[in-house]
Amino acid sequence: MVFEPLHDRVLVRPAEAEEVTKGGIIIPDTAKEKPQQGEIIEVGEGKTEDGKLIPLKLKVGDTILYGKYSGTEITFNGENLLIMRESDVFGIIH
């Protein structure tokens, strides 16, 4: 199956949460912080303002930084993903 976000939404694959601290301490699942970066895997067409379509600046493959509680978590094809609006993204990591 293929998922295509609508309007100004993007589909994000969150980065994996840290499992071991820099000091070598193993972090249990209950104490792991939610990742705040991920990879764009699908983008919508863009948003419409005043009858004109404004395309998104984000593109598939971009690594992004977003808020800790941004987006809606979904499971699609057995994978945990996030759907969020382009405005929830803080920036692109190069």
Image (cartoon, helix red, strand yellow):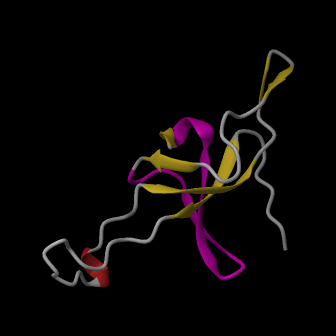
Residue 48: quadrant of the picture: top right
Report the residue at 41% width, 55% height from top.
36
How many marks can you see?
0
- In the displayed structure, does residue 90 sit left or right of residue 4? left
Report the residue at 46% width, 47% height from top.
66
Confirm whether the magenta stretch covers residue 75. Answer: yes
- In the displayed structure, does residue 31 sit left or right of residue 65? left
Task: Give x and y (percent) for residue 29.
Answer: 31, 82
Indicate whether 30 appears above or below 17.
below
Q: From which residue to which does the magenta span run?
A: 68-89
Indicate whether 4 appears above or below 76.
above
Confirm whether the magenta stretch covers residue 85. Answer: yes
Task: Give x and y (percent) for residue 92.
Answer: 52, 41
Specify the farthest residue to the top: 50
Task: Give x and y (percent) for residue 1.
Answer: 84, 74
Residue 44: quadrant of the picture: top right
Residue 16: quadrant of the picture: bottom left
Task: Give x and y (percent) for residue 67.
Answer: 41, 47
Specify the farthest residue to the left: 23
Specify the farthest residue to the front: 94
Report the residue at 45% width, 55% height from top.
37
Indicate whether 57 appears above or below 25.
above
